[in-house]
Amino acid sequence: MAALVPDPMAAGGIAGFAVRIRRGEITIAAAVEAYLERIAALDGRLGAFEHVATAPARAAAGALDALLAAGIDLGPLMGVPVAVKDIIATNGMPTTAGSTVDVADLIGGEGAFVRSLRHAGCVILGKVKTVEFAAGGTGINYVRGTPWNPWDAETQREPSGSSSGSGVAMAAGLCGFAVGSDTTGSVRGPAAHCGVFGLKTTKGLWPTDGVYPLVPTLDTLGPLTRTAADAAAIFSGLTGTPVPVPPPARGLRLGRPSRLFFEGLDAHVERTMTEALARLAAAGAEIVPLELPEAAEVVESFVDFLPIEMIASLGRERFLAHRAEMDPLVAARGDAGLDVSADTYARLLKRHHALCGIAQRRMLGFDGWVAPTRPTVPAPVISRAEAEARPPTPSNLWPNTPAVSYFGLCASSTPIHGLAGGLPVGLQLMCPGGADARLLSIARTFEEIFGPPPKPELAPFL
């Protein structure tokens, strides 16, 4: 068995890589080549990538090395190899939105966010898989394939979704960072189930033109990374603001919502969360029980709200014409949006805006709220026949992450499975909308307290 080439960013992350390329210790071309080799070695089993842009990535890397040699420095993200979720238009690469249905007219051309990656000097390695139309939380895609969660080589487990390929690619070290989208948890879920860090940004922080519109009211873009420090470097590099620095744990006041967020936990998640909260308290953070009665509305509201905007974006006629071609889980979700009245949608939208204001007020006096990202560990992938036999149910929404979106908050998922061993578990940190920099600062403190999480064993996938 050939040895797997080392991940060029495993030690030192984005900041360390930036130092190394400027010292001449590594070239951008060498880093890109290492990731292409890792993709070639591992992705046949993992299936994270929908499209690998080998020639364009090599060409971009060579050009960026030439710029550096000429004294032209594009900034802290220069040369970082990136994987982009396959709902995001990227020039010269296909965008399938995880489907065989043509939705190119809904996505359009390359948008401002991808252009900002290019302007920052990132190298786009290719497109990574997604749940069809980004409309699912398990990560399963029966149409274009489900990426294999690298935490179990024997049993295929859900990578979570919809940014399934982004989570798997990041967990396996197939890129410097991965771009995902998060509507109801599509960055945070894969981060939690694949054992990496994920950032759900405030709605509107980064533009979503050139991105498939699942739920335009809530859609956001965000990175999946090795660490909170890497996410902070990306945030800084793309917003032109200082890198968020970790504050002392002592003095942090963190709310622990008593409803919804801590219900239905499996034993491993509950045990790991208990240990995480104990370590935060031991480091000096105050953990305060929090009543959040509005959380009970979220699941009921999302049963209607998400399918309505999904059908509005896709189009009723197109959905009905192509329903038989779609992933059965996605098709069932779309069915729920076909017969919802306009007044119901207007009421839900009005309530969403009201809840955003309520959540901002309930955040007063807290630095953030903490809860599990997902209530369970990654489950085995079920067959298409099993999926089609199951009655449609909203339970796979996993209310912990949709609640954050409906409340208009920003949030992150920090891997904490190193505290108790076993399959990955994520701790969700929630902060007020617009407080993304503060969120990343606190997440960096969490990272210092919890320590680096273990990585999956990749040798069985070679």
Image (tube, grey):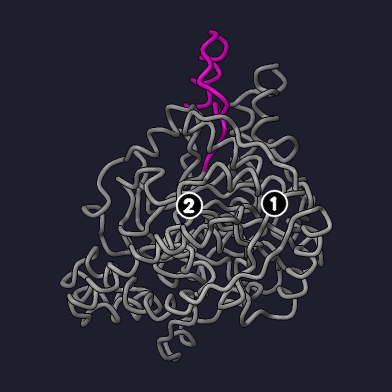
Q: Is residue 45 visible?
A: no
Q: Which mark is residue 252?
A: 1
Which mark lies nearer to you, 2 or 1?
Answer: 1
Q: Describe the element under mark 1 as helix, strand or loop.
A: loop
- Front-most of 432 and 37? 432
Task: Locate residue 372: give its quadrant.
Answer: bottom right
Label 2: which residue?
A: 180
Q: Tell me where residue 276 appears, x and y as whole percent.
A: 76, 63
Tell me what residue is drawn at x 47 percent, y 59 percent.
361
Residue 153's label in the rendered image is none
Q: Nearer the viewer, residue 441 or 110?
A: 441
- Picture residue at 28% right of the left edge, 67% below the top: 349
Locate residue 240, reporting x and y percent: 48, 28
Span colored in magenta: 59-82
Say few, some or many: other residues with alpha carbon within 10 Å of mark 2 (under 14 / 14 to 19 / 20 or more). many
Amino acid type at image mark 1: Leu
Secondary structure beneath disc 2?
strand
Type of the residue with mark 2:
Gly
* In the depicted structure, whether residue 460 falls above or below residue 237: below
Q: Is residue 401 visible?
A: yes
Asked if residue 143 is positioned above or below residue 246 in the image, the reply reads: below
Residue 207 rendering spot, x and y as whole percentages: 35, 43
Q: Is residue 8 above or below residue 348?
A: above
Q: Is residue 340 left or right of residue 167?
A: left
- First in sequence: mark 2 vs mark 1: 2
Q: Residue at x 24, y 65 (%)?
A: 314
- How far separated are the C-alphas under marks 2 and 1? 29 Å
